[in-house]
Amino acid sequence: MEGAKQATGGNPHEIGLMSFTRAARQEAAERAGEAWGIDPDSLTKDGWIRTGHSICYRQLGVQTGQLLTDSKADQGWVAECFGVRLSTTLDENSANQVWIGDARVAWSLNAWQYHRVTLMPLDEVIKRMREYDPEDAQDISEVQSVAEQYESSKRLDDRCDFTDLLLRFAGVSCSPKHGIGRVKPEGELPPVTTWLFDEQQDASPLLDLVCRRLLEGAKVRFAYAVGDPFQSIYGFAGSSSECFMGWQVSRERTMPKSYRCPAKILDYGEMCLRKMTRSGGYWDRGVAPSGGEGKILNHYDIEEMSSIVKGDDDWLLLARTNYHVSRISGYLASIGIPCRSTRSNAEPTLRGIGMSALFKLENNQPVTGEEWSRAIAILPSRSAKEEIVKRGWKKKWKDQPMAAQWDVIFPEDLQEVGATAQLCSAIASGDWCGLVDHGTAWRKSAKKYGPDLASAPKVRVGTIHSAKGMQAENVAVLTTTSQRVQRASEIEEQYNEECRLAYVAATRSSRNLHIIEEAGLRKPRMEAFA
């Protein structure tokens, strides 16, 4: 980006960087803003550091209320179109939002979505999905019927979804009856001189067409596509590293040295990749390890491994499925280790701020009015037959600018700001923790590590998919998986993706890699973590 800025006259708003996630977009904007002395918000709102969907949304001029999102209201709109119960959830295989509820409609909508992003013939999509999810599989006529009803409902109400943005900008038509076709693209091309496409191995065939159209802009002089085909782990969501590897380029460069992984961990990651079948296309890129020593340690249950986790150390604990993530999080909480989801940022949550305020007051420390407003928000109005918060005071702190009236609140002021005598007593004794969800575990963590770490933990827990791009000095990976994932990995294409997932998990570590293999529980079929 720095080189592009110099080569194109120094105007940062002529540099476009397309990311796949809002988090990646924000990180790029903040780093560029700091380097160039520019407000990061200017680079994302006025400039072109954006996600692919955001670029299309802006150029198509879609109005507020037209776009269907994952909000409950929009899910309800789709459910009402079919007269059935529908909602979306984060799928553990694809790390993508999928429809659940009525089996016929949900399966058909998921097939229709996969068809539109992969641009594969609908019958091939159905065949592929039936291999992964045979229980609710529908035939092509049923999928076409559901898709036609969905598309006609959007037309009648002038609505569109995120995939429609890409289709329209790329110039692709998608009809339940007539399949995939090319039409005139919509939306003007951005006035960008240089495009950078990040994590390009995660592009779907549809998003790849969006990227290629962006290069048709009259001012475009340079384009850089960056990716690692061995970190392609979103096949269930429609991505394909073949799109990235299929670009005709004037120059190709391979990262000469890992900035993160020491030799032992880098070799371990390569071992996971070499377990792929021939169709996986493995080759040695000749990347040198970073400096420093690396260790690989084996454990045989979560409890034994968790005993060495310290709440004030840099830890990343990963599992293949959401269920096993919850197992790890639950056990860490039970032993007083503060942890947060990989999907959350490092800032304290509003709930954490509230509990931190109650903990400070318990220890005779003052809090600000803003902190007390968060505390009173998480407390119940009543507990059993006792009043906890005085009548009307929760609303006062929510609807009126009370925080501005109270710069500081001491324990002796609590009854003046809405606390009953019962609440004052509970705060003084530490029994307040029983009044709020997860309060006991939080207080246990705060007593051991302090309220700051309890509110904004350093230890992160999540799925392998959610940890893409992250790193930590200490990484622990639980190899136990689910029956569904195990069944899917019997298909060669998915087997290779599981090997790539193992590679991504292992290479998050910059020092110590802990492998947790639970005796007697399911392991990935390919045994990439061996």
Image: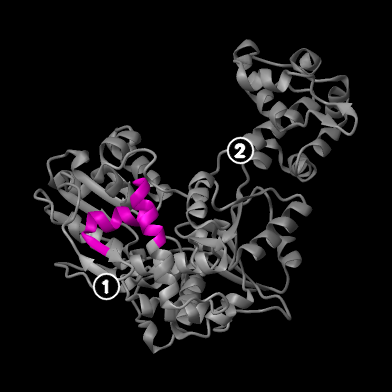
Say which amino acid is labelled 2: Thr
**Residue placed furthest toward the left:** 218
Name the foreground residue: 515 vs 493. Answer: 493
Residue 314 screen position, x and y as percent: 59, 52
Q: Which residue is mark 2?
A: 349
Magenta stretch mostly in which secondary structure?
helix
Q: Quadrant of residue 378?
A: top right
Q: Which residue is mark 1?
A: 245
Asked if the magenta segment contains residue 457, the reply would be: no
Name the foreground residue: 325 vs 367. Answer: 325
Q: Is residue 80 visible?
A: yes
In which quadrant will I find the C terminus?
Answer: bottom right
Q: Is 452 located above or below residue 112 in the figure?
A: above
Asked if the magenta segment contains residue 152, the reply would be: yes
The number of callouts visible is: 2
Residue at (57, 83) in percent of width and height: 525
